[in-house]
Amino acid sequence: MGELNTILTYVKNLFVINLILCVAFTSTAQGINTIENIIETLSIEEKIAMCHAQSKFSSTGVPRLGIPELWMSDGPHGIRAEMNWDDWNYANWTNDYVTAFPALTCLAATFNPDLSLEYGISLGEEARYRNKDVLLGPGVNIYRTPLNGRNFEYMGEDPYLAAKMVVPYIKGIQQNGVAACVKHFALNNQEKWRGHINVEVSYRALHEIYLPAFKAAVIEGKAWAIMGAYNKFRGQHCCHNKILLKNILKDLWRFDGVVLSDWAGTHSTNEAIFNGLDIEMGTPSDKNISIRYPHQNNFLGKPFLEKIISGEVDERILNDKVRRILRLMFRTSLNKTRTFGKINNSEHYKTAYNIASEGIVLLKNSESLLPLDKNKKIKIAVIGENAKKTMSVGGGSSELKTDKEISPLFGIKKEFNNAIIEYARGYSSNTDNYLELRNEAISVARDADVVLFIGGLNKNTFQDSEAEDRKQYELPYGQPQLLKEISKYNKNIVVILISGNAVKTDWKSDVKSILQTWYLGSEAGNALASVLSGKVNPSGKLPFSFPKLLKDNGAHHFGEKSYPGKDGSQFYSEDILVGYRWHDTKKIKPSFGFGHGLSYTTFELWDINSDKKKYASNDTIKVKCKVKNTGVIEGKEVVQVYVGKKKSKVKRAKKELKGFKKVAVSSNQSIEVNINIDIKELAYYNEKSASWEIEKGNYIIYIGNGSRNISKEIEITII
Ligand code: BGC
């Protein structure tokens, strides 16, 4: 009898293996059937094993059925170097060098969704080459405070922009058979105390500001995985938060993918079981149980197993998690048609270069100091530690091992090969021989034709880096004082800010030009040099505001209770008025506003109209405008459409971004731009009815090329 059972099990398993192999090529309906067949075949132990990590970056499959493991990697700017099986040390492989793509803030600053698709495709190819199934990115937490150490990994302060940019990125990754894992869901808007801070925010701000990019990622981008956040929301950790994961993500948005915990973000077996966590990652292991599989005691390991065996938890809950995991496997590791991928090829570097150069933002350019003529034998003083600093290393989990990162200084020397270039470090992040560095900088600057001051932040702890926030809004390491001093000797200063965050720019009147240049990845120096020489005409726009003072930012206006929190909790008292919504509504002028970005040419927006004056709630507003390039060189401009409600019955931001389009226009040419806005996009979230409501009445449409540079206002009515 025993033998017969073994034979029967063997035959059944063969049947399932066959199905697994077949389904990789066949339809969804059969896929579902197969998943159900597999679930029936699995033992409880096998199913439990799939719900938690087996190593630092993998979870197990079912070896006896040939169901492979799932391999994951950070994200979001390239594929992270290999780590040891069960610790945070790098494995020191020699074949895991990758392309470093620009940080997501830079991608957002391009305002160009086509580049986002290119980014996703290239990154997905690198993930495939490295045999990864799940890419731990993109990050779409909203930029709430300029102190957040991880803003550089996200897409800025506006939910509409982030939503539009994240969808193509996901599609690009996933068309390679690699899952995008959107993170960190949700409200992980600061690093300080990230493991325990409890966020209290209104449902309205949650739905209008903090969730739209995640919602677009799930519903339009069809992301296959999502990662919970470390912090708490309304008293419960986000990795097993009932409101976020069960009610919103799975029930409301019908997410059919897998919820992963952030690494060591799981704290409760029961909450993890019932509130929607599918795979627990990063919880410390216990090598006493098994050297190779040391995670069996994790929250979703043995404690979960015991609850199923005792009948305390219905096996159907486990099956739902396994069904999702198998679905993810059929989309990735069991997808036999996916490509093999590519790495470090010229196309990927080209993509990195295109995004880097298109994301650079020209904040200021008095007397048209830029571009610099590369044919002239000018003397250029390059000053600043960031001119030489490697930026793909550091910053936490997004750091990369790349054998190509062109430094700004290298890129500038290559591009300006007729110039005399002298370098001085000027300031230092790790020594304080201030006077010596300052004197050297002044001597280089005083007789130069132009000073390129390359500073900003870096990827050190307390700068743009994980686990801690910045401690100050000002530029660090004495840069503001140094700039003041240099400006006494040379008036032709270009400040090149390398950062993923806004900084205080009270020195801006002392310098002629400012470029915001992000962490640009492998092609950093080439992209920067192209913009400096005019080979690329800058067209990036700020994805977040630069407040003059920290207290001008909405989150900081309300003090400690709002940021960083008090007694374990924080209240998002600025509510829906995040970023430029705060500045505009409260009439607080920023140093540079959201959407701002200059060009070496000039544009005029004219002939601006909407198709009608009155709209029904199921209509679409069709905005039409012409963009004329009134300068002498070709350039790209971003038409931005904002909408605000006049006399609303609820609190409203003065205006909110509802559409944008980037166009290339030759000198003296005009191009027509059409932007459509569905009236339903103007709805606000009504907390009482827990639904989106379109308020009738008068609205203003603002059309311009920056949130504070509006060319025309048009009044319309929703009837
Ligand atoms: C980060 C995640 C990352 C994970 C794995 C965590 O500390 O918050 O973004 O994906 O580590 O490295």
Image (cartoon, grey):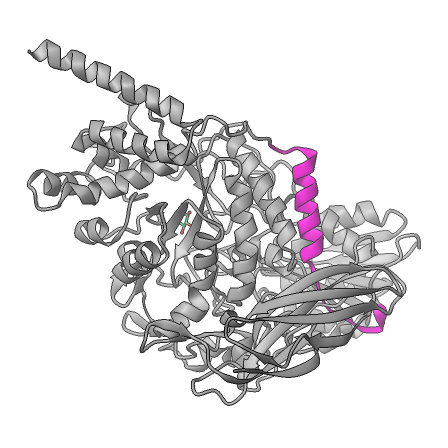
Residue 366 falls within the magenta-colored stretch: yes
Kindly indicate the quadrant of the structure image that contains residue 596: bottom right
Q: In this picture, is 439 found above or below 79?
A: below
User: Is residue 546 at least partly visible in the picture?
Assistant: yes
In the rendered view, does 391 fall on the left or right side of 289? right
Q: Is residue 645 above or below residue 374?
A: below
**Residue 377 in the figure: left or right of residue 21:** right
Residue pushed farthest top?
A: 3
Q: Residue at x 63, y 63 (%)?
A: 434
Q: Position of residue 118 (x, y in %)?
A: 63, 45
Rendered location of residue 471, percent (x, y): 47, 67
Up-down relation of residue 667 to residue 485 (above or below): above
Q: Residue at x 70, y 46 (%)?
A: 353
Magenta segment boundaries in residue numbering: 343-368
Image point (90%, 64%), residue name: 632
The question of residue 412 being in magenta is answered with: no
Q: Is residue 309 above or below residue 422?
A: above
Q: x and y percent of residue 227 in the render?
A: 38, 50
The residue closer to the viewer here, 188 or 631, is: 631
- In which quadrant is the N terminus drawn? top left
Q: Is residue 56 visible?
A: no
Numbered-mark total: 0
Looking at the image, which is closer to me, 430 or 345?
345
Is the magenta region chiefly helix, strand or loop? helix
Question: Residue 331's quadrant in the figure?
Answer: top left
Question: Would residue 385 be found to the left or right of residue 97 on screen?
Answer: right
Q: Where residue 272 sits: x, y (%)?
A: 23, 50
